[in-house]
Image (cartoon, helix red, strand yellow):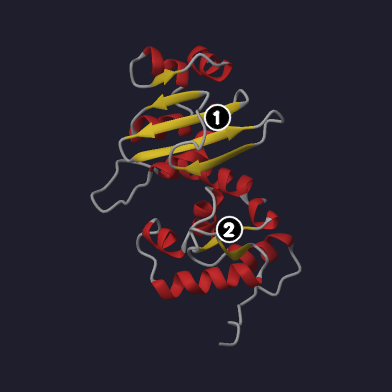
């Protein structure tokens, strides 16, 4: 099948060029999923409720052609294909963080038709929990994700429990996570109010509890 001819704004402008690459519907949400780590096609489809298989396949192909993502085969015994971001694709993390911060004000009451996944709360929480180097495991009723803070302050997140023993664990609900992301609630304040539980004896856990 020949590559799809992508529409362009045909404007000599950095913002327009960026939107040429990631402005299609679903593309940035696919980036959000892949920022959490390599994903199989079926996993992507499951965590992007509402996207058709045709559209998902088309967007992934566009991202491959644009140098944002690549498809590779996992080593045996898994023997499955996964999609993952290239270094160029991972550079979109601050873009997604800014969008999440800007969009946090639009999160009102959750409606019955709103899908939710635990790791969708990672982006707005990165700036809140990235105060000390270490690995934080976050538990919500909807699931788990983990945040990794490097010694240089670089942050990343992954879906599910941390692959190693985390330096701290945090338990909260979705409503509390929304308030943290909006900046109307601090972690230490949530701990004192009984809305957040932080466990662990590491420097990261102590910083979170102390605020």
For residue 87, what is the image quadrant? Answer: bottom right
Residue 169 image offset from top left, x and y in percent: 44, 25
Residue at mark 1: 135
Q: Is residue 81 left or right of residue 53?
A: right
Residue 134 image offset from top left, x and y in percent: 59, 27
Residue 183 image offset from top left, x and y in percent: 49, 28
Front position in the image: 171 or 4: 171
Q: Secondary structure at mark 2?
A: strand
Furthest toward the front, the residue is 77
Q: From what the image shows, is residue 148 above or below residue 72? A: above
Residue 151 image offset from top left, x and y in percent: 69, 28
Residue at mark 2: 84
Q: CA distance from mark 2 to mark 1?
A: 21 Å
Q: Is residue 142 left or right of residue 170?
A: left
Q: Secondary structure at mark 1?
A: strand
Furthest toward the left, the residue is 112
Q: Is residue 153 left or right of residue 72?
A: right
Q: Quick one: label 1, few (<14), some, or many (20+) residues within 10 Å?
A: many
Task: Mark 2 and mark 1 in contact? Answer it, CB < 8 Å.
Answer: no
């Amino acid at each position: 099948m020949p590559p799809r001819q992508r529409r362009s704004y045909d404007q000599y402008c950095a913002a327009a060029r960026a939107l040429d690459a990631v402005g299609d519907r679903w593309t940035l949400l696919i980036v959000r999923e892949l920022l959490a780590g390599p994903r199989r096609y079926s996993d992507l489809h499951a965590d992007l409720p509402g996207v058709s298989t045709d559209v998902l396949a088309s967007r992934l192909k566009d991202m491959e052609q644009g140098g944002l993502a690549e498809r590779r085969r996992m080593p045996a015994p898994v023997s499955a294909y996964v999609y993952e971001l290239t270094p160029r694709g991972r550079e979109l993390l601050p873009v997604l963080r800014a969008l999440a911060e800007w969009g946090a004000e639009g999160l009102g009451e959750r409606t019955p038709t709103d899908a939710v996944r635990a790791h969708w709360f990672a982006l707005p929480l990165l700036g809140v929990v990235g105060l000390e180097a270490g690995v934080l495991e976050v538990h919500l009723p909807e699931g788990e994700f983990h945040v990794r803070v490097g010694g240089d302050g670089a942050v990343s997140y992954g879906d599910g429990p941390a692959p190693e023993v985390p330096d701290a664990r945090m338990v909260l609900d979705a409503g509390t996570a929304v308030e943290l992301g909006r900046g109307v609630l601090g972690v230490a304040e949530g701990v004192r109010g009984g809305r957040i539980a932080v466990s662990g004896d590491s420097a990261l856990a102590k910083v979170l509890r102390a605020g």
